[in-house]
Amino acid sequence: MPHSLFISDLHLCPTRPAITALFMRFVRDIAPQAEALYILGDFFEYWAGDDDLAEPFHTAITDALAGLAQQGTRIYLMHGNRDFLLSDAFMGAAQATLLPAPLLLDLYGTPTLLMHGDTLCTDDVAYQQFRAMVRSAEWQNNFLAQPLSQRKAQIDELRKKSAQEKSGKSAEIMDVNSDAVENTLREHGYPRLIHGHTHRPARHVHTVDGKTCERWVLPDWYVSGGYLRCDAAGCVAHTLEISAEEAKHAR
Ligand code: LP5
Ligand code: MN
């Protein structure tokens, strides 16, 4: 049956090899049967710029995606809050298409809205201010004009600062705001919504203006991985456990 797969928040990086191995298995055994793979942000732990593509870890990932594309699975990627600097050179190497966000698509007859999910966290005012700054073209041009090593040092600082700030934020602040969800659903004509970011995988049902909408939150890839599979009959969430063999990569 024709179907599409959705993943997000893999946070791929060389220091979590078991998760990388799990992703490679997903790409080898599961994704080739799908018409399309949608990666809804935070595919990488962070992305400092496409001039980091030659890093062997990054090459291994783009090679895996390009191999999947060669088998006929279309690959779509949306930016997350950690990898919004992924650009044309990456898309070319991975044979992937960058998606604008949010994106409303007709998924086997069901209007479906795709987004990373961070824009729904409107109570996290400090983050939203930070986001507005780093998503401006001017800020990105200035940032990318710096040498790669300098950018990575700044990202290191930022990651520490973000971890520190997050420890002082409540779980509610870092979750989606229900008004933001309802407004988004209303604005886009009450579609099905698929997003990640909050690391709280679930299927929610919202009733907005008397219309019932499904909201799928994708899982992160930390202790285990997972994906959402959608076809004409609907969507089903699948968990992927790290195998004993893959776990050996971590030692
Ligand atoms: O990703 P997650 O879920 O852990 O946390 C997010 C928000 N944090 C971030 C920061 C990223 O995690 C860090 C890596 C990003 C790499 C981007 C590369 C290019 C930019 C480089 C800029 C130097 O997105 C976190 C949210 C959380 O989601 C839940 O929604 O709370 O937000 C924060 O913690 C942000 C703080 O609240 C505000 C940060 C102010 C930083 C001030 C500038 C410091 C610059 C230091 C470098 C010079
Ligand atoms: Mn995120």
Image: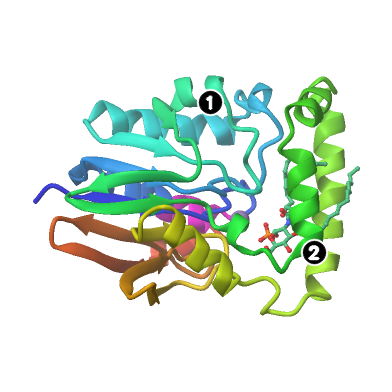
Q: Image quadrant of residue 240?
A: bottom left
Q: Residue 163 shows which numbered tag?
A: 2
Identify which residue is drawn at 36% across, 55% down: 189
Circle 2 Cα neighbour tier, 10 Å, few/some/many (<14 / 14–19 / ≥20): few
Residue type at mark 1: give it.
Phe
Q: Name the element at disc 1.
A: helix
Residue 1 percent across, percent down from the top left: 8, 51
Q: Image quadrant of residue 231?
A: bottom left
Residue 171 percent across, percent down from the top left: 68, 79
Tell which circle, 2 or 1, labels the residue nearer the N-terminal end: 1
Does ligand 1 reach within 8 Å of label 2's beta carbon?
yes
The answer to whether residue 81 is above or below residue 178 is above
Identify which residue is drawn at 84% across, 57% down: 160
Residue type at mark 2: give it.
Ala
Q: Which residues are magenta?
A: 16-22
Residue 79 percent across, percent down from the top left: 56, 41
Task: Name the residue carrying label 1.
Answer: 90
Residue 17 is inside the magenta segment: yes
Majority secondary structure of magenta residues: helix
